[in-house]
Amino acid sequence: MKKRIWEALVIVICTIGIIACNPQETVKTNLQGPESKESKTEEIRVETGTTAVYEATLEELAQLLEMTDSETATLLGGGEENWTEDKSFYIGRIYEIQLYDGIFPVYTCCDDDKKVNAVSVWLENGDRELSKEDVEPWVNRLTEFTGAEAIYDEISSEAGTKQWKWVSEDRIVSLMWTGQLLSLYMNLAIGELY
């Protein structure tokens, strides 16, 4: 009897160790019944207590433009209100999404009527120096998404920012790269100079 309790305890400890190391993995455990000498494998989906991140597309991000803030509240897995520190001005919403192979923060900006007029995604936030090879996949994705060739600003700003723009009748999509930072912006083309 003590041996079975010890075996059960070892299985529980090993399962907890696997869960801690691989929280998103499916854990396979070997279960052996008291009357059976056969082993059977059972797959267990492990929930770690964290909420799943919404898997978004570029199309969904673009659709946020011109929506009212209240319409966007539950989209992309739900957004958190974003105010200035003194709560005097409402900025928009903050989301966390999965886009392609990464998890990124998304920010909306609203006008005075609380309509979304801009969406930004922070693709890289300064953790490492980026190379042209890091940026090229995003240029290709945005070219495919917009169906247009990018307008590239070859003259970098004093800060060293490089910028690509894709312009359509209703919106402008921009990709900005500064050393360790890479961000994607979508805004309405109304009144824009480009």
Image (spheres, rainbow, N blue to C red):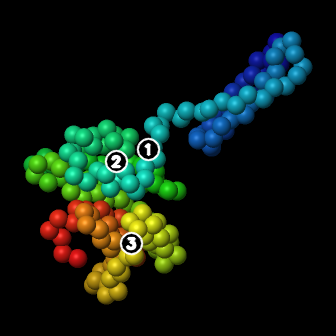
Residue at 70% of width from left, 31% of height from top? 43
- Foreground label between 2 and 3: 3
Q: Residue 4 or 30: which is nearer the viewer?
A: 30
Q: Is residue 100 left or right of residue 12?
A: left
Q: Residue 147 or 1: which is nearer the viewer?
A: 147
Image coords of residue 70 (percent x, y) = 21, 40
Q: Are marks 1 and 2 in contact (CB under 8 Å)?
A: yes
Q: Are marks 2 and 3 in contact (CB under 8 Å)?
A: no
Image coords of residue 164 (percent x, y) = 35, 75
Q: Residue furthest right?
A: 37
Element at badge 2?
Answer: strand
Q: Amino acid at mark 3?
A: Ala
- Quadrant containing the N terminus is top right
The residues tagged by marks 3 and 1 sit, at their Cα atoms, a distance apart of 27 Å
| Label 1 packing within 10 angstroms: few (<14), some (14-19), many (20+) | some
Element at badge 1?
Answer: strand
- Foreground label between 3 and 1: 3
Q: Earlier in the sequence, mark 3 or mark 1?
A: 1
Does residue 188 appear in this view? yes
| Label 3 packing within 10 angstroms: few (<14), some (14-19), many (20+) | few
Q: Amino acid at mark 1?
A: Tyr
